[in-house]
Image (cartoon, rainbow, N blue to C red):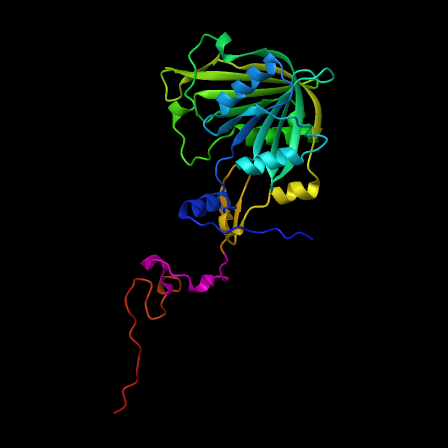
Amino acid sequence: MAVSRINKPRTKRGKRYLENRDPKVVENVKRAMFIKGGRTSDKITKALKQFYILKTPFALMLSKKNILRPFDDSNPLEYLAQKNDHSLFMFGFDSKKRPDSLIIGRMFDNQVLDMFEFGIEKFSPMEDFKNEKVTLGTKPMLVFNGEAFSVDPEYIRLKCLLTDYFRGEVVQNVRLQGLEHVLNFTALDGKLYFRSYKTTFLKSGTKIPNVELTEIGPSFDFVVRRSKLASDELYKKSKKQPKEIMPNKKKNIVRDGLGTTYGRIHMQKQDLDRLQLRKLKAFKRKFDKPDENKSENGNIKKSKTDNID
């Protein structure tokens, strides 16, 4: 039986390289690699370039053609992903049986997690739209339209894949002027419509500006052909988060669906008889019962005593 040998780095540069590829508590931004098949059409080549521009700078375009069949044998694809340290991929090919096909997928633990095959029915590149484009590397806003994204289990997984593919960096703060790119996905009758828009903020006389959308491309009309989803066990394993980033659970604190925080306080039963109040004359006990030593006129009665000589 062959034993896998672990080579230790000989230089500091090699050590840093291996440490960068090791699993981390907070992972790096997911990168995508774009692969051309053994036979590609002009439409597929342009489509790969369009998606490569959308994913820049977290993208890698492989120059050589690779004869792959991911749905039949995913080992060569997994080797390329591990070699280049990329967890997202897009593979384009063209054949008589499946013309103008794109396969979009993602990896987990160096093995294919999910992938979908789409056929391009209609395509318009960015050059066909003569509008002002957004800045490269801008984090887009994702919009999903269609009942299938919330009902169909396959489309729910597709929504998760597309979110993972195009979300970009995870940021803590958001600048209003930076929200300039919108990617819209519409699922209807087994087709997926992909549109890209640029936002323009106009004055409205209030703090909330008016927003206009201008289509800047690319524009795709896809037909969903086939898919390969991970097993429930592997998918559950991929969603597991390390304990280091999990927030510490606080007792007696509950949040509702709107984000409102409610707290529960436990107190001992209070004795109302010993409740400390303001000391007012009206609450004194001597005003509650009349003093027997006082007369009706308020004069103090003198007690009669017998004088004994």
Residue 136 visible? The answer is yes
The answer to which of 300 and 17 lies nearer the viewer is 17
Residue 156 visible? The answer is no
Look at the image and give the residue range highlighted in magenta.
266-285
Q: Against 67, is 235 above or below?
A: below
Residue 156 drawn at (x, y percent): 65, 30
Residue found at x 51% / y 30%: 167
Magenta span includes 283: yes
Q: Main secondary structure of the magenta part?
A: loop
Q: Against 307, is 303 above or below?
A: above
Query: Which quadrant is the C terminus positioned in?
Result: bottom left
Residue found at x 64% / y 29%: 158
Count of numbered badges drawn on the protein: 0
Residue 232 drawn at (x, y percent): 70, 41
Residue 163 drawn at (x, y percent): 56, 30
Residue found at x 49% / y 22%: 54
Magenta span includes 190: no
Q: Against 17, is 250 above or below?
A: below
The answer to which of 51 and 154 lies nearer the viewer is 51
Residue found at x 53% / y 19%: 49
